[in-house]
Amino acid sequence: MKDTLIKNLVPLSNFTSWRIGGLAEWFAEPKTIEEIEQLIEWANDKKVPVQSLGAGSNVLISDKGLQGLTICLKKLQTNKINDENGIITVLAGEPIPTIARRVAKIGISGLEWSAGIPGTIGGAVVMNAGAKQYCIADKLISAKVICLKTKKVFELNNKELSFGYRNSRLQHDKLIVLSAKLKLTPNKNPEKILKETYANITERLNTQPYHLPSCGSVFRNPEPLKAGALIENLGLKGTKVGGAEISKIHANFIVNTNKAKAKDIEELICLIQRKVQKKYGFLLFPEVKKLGFDEIH
Ligand SMILES: Cc1cc2nc3c(=O)[nH]c(=O)nc-3n(C[C@H](O)[C@H](O)[C@H](O)COP(=O)(O)OP(=O)(O)OC[C@H]3O[C@@H](n4cnc5c(N)ncnc54)[C@H](O)[C@@H]3O)c2cc1C
């Protein structure tokens, strides 16, 4: 393995959309599956834990940072698009917006809803990312994964991934997603698909605080209710802790307005949970994944 692949003490705030997070003890951005295999072997030899990261757009990383090896998959990119049958195979690090625009331009429909989601395909599969009535599970045939213990590479089909609302078995298993195979719909009108794709992006820009660092919606919706509406009804928009603020534009977003720390975000999350519990009698569950909070340092 190249010595330069693994770096020591890397600020994770540069790798999250919230611009928050302490240091990774060890950090790597592999470009190939072979490099990922070497990294897993290295971590297993050293007996250190491995943490996967995509675009960091749905994680809250502790101010204390992460022990062990953080593998950021963002550079694991390429895609194969079959414009006759609409089947696309995408490596985990491909940005969702890039792939959504690419298929739209060649008249393949099915990802119009996703172009404003700033994550990777790997992260989207793990989170079962979605918007409106759509989600990635609707289109996913299978995901290729590698086991962090055995380095075995294998495919899991849609059913085996146990998808639910913003959920999949990958959130609990010790696996890294290497690639995803999706079935989209070919031979449609590119102009119409692009129009819908850009309309969805415009709608987001008009209703969500895209100009400030965030992780999107912080809480899962307690369906059929909307977390944002519940928080707004409590008058919490604009509430600040340190450099973090409950967005004045969309109450389910917490934005980093001025060098916020993870502990500021955590405090706002707890405040919202307390107030919602008191008023409505149930707990809101975060959609965002908290990393590095229960490690002993
Ligand atoms: C402005 C904004 C708008 C958003 N809008 C939406 C929306 O409309 N709908 C929606 O669902 N989400 C939305 N999100 C949240 C986020 O973009 C999605 O959840 C996205 O799918 C996360 O992908 P990621 O690559 O950033 O994953 P990360 O945030 O890097 O990781 C999320 C989780 O997946 C794991 N993970 C990531 N990649 C891999 C991999 N290759 N293998 C194994 N585990 C992995 C991580 O360990 C972590 O537990 C939004 C975020 C922002 C900032």
Image (cartoon, grey):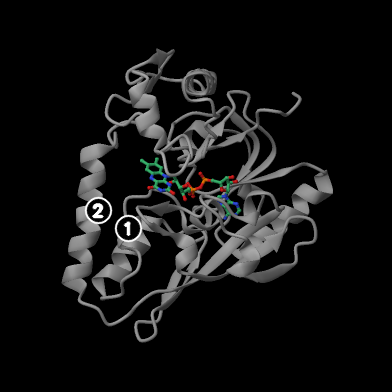
Q: Which mark is residue 204?
A: none
Question: Dot 2 lies on which element?
Answer: helix
Q: Specify few, some or many for label 1: CA neighbours under 10 Å numbering under 14, 14-19, or 20 or more.
A: many
Residue 221 percent across, percent down from the top left: 45, 40
Looking at mark 2, is its residue's CB closer than 8 Å to ligand 1? no
Closer to the camera, 178 or 77? 178
Quadrant holding the C terminus: top right
What residue is drawn where x is 44% and y is 70%?
A: 79
Instruction: Please say if 154 is above or below 235.
Output: below
Give the residue number, with chain letter if any, for mark 2: 200
Say what amino acid the circle numbered 2 marks: Asn
In this picture, residue 199 sits left or right of residue 133: left
Identify the residue shown where x is 34% and y is 63%. 100
Identified at 24% across, 70% down, the residue is 105
Q: Image quarter for residue 228? A: top left
Whole-percent x and y of residue 143? 58, 67
Q: Are marks 1 and 2 in contact (CB under 8 Å)?
A: yes
Disc 1 from disc 2: Cα separation: 6 Å
Question: Could you say where residue 277 lies in the image, as x and y percent from the top left?
Answer: 53, 23
Q: Earlier in the sequence, mark 1 or mark 2?
A: 1
Q: Helix or strand or loop: what does disc 1 sit on?
A: helix
> Quick check: 274 above or below 153?
above
Kindly identify the amino acid type of the residue bearing the numbered disc 1.
Trp
Residue 224, quarter of the rendered image: top left
- Judge whether residue 134 can be spotted in this image: yes
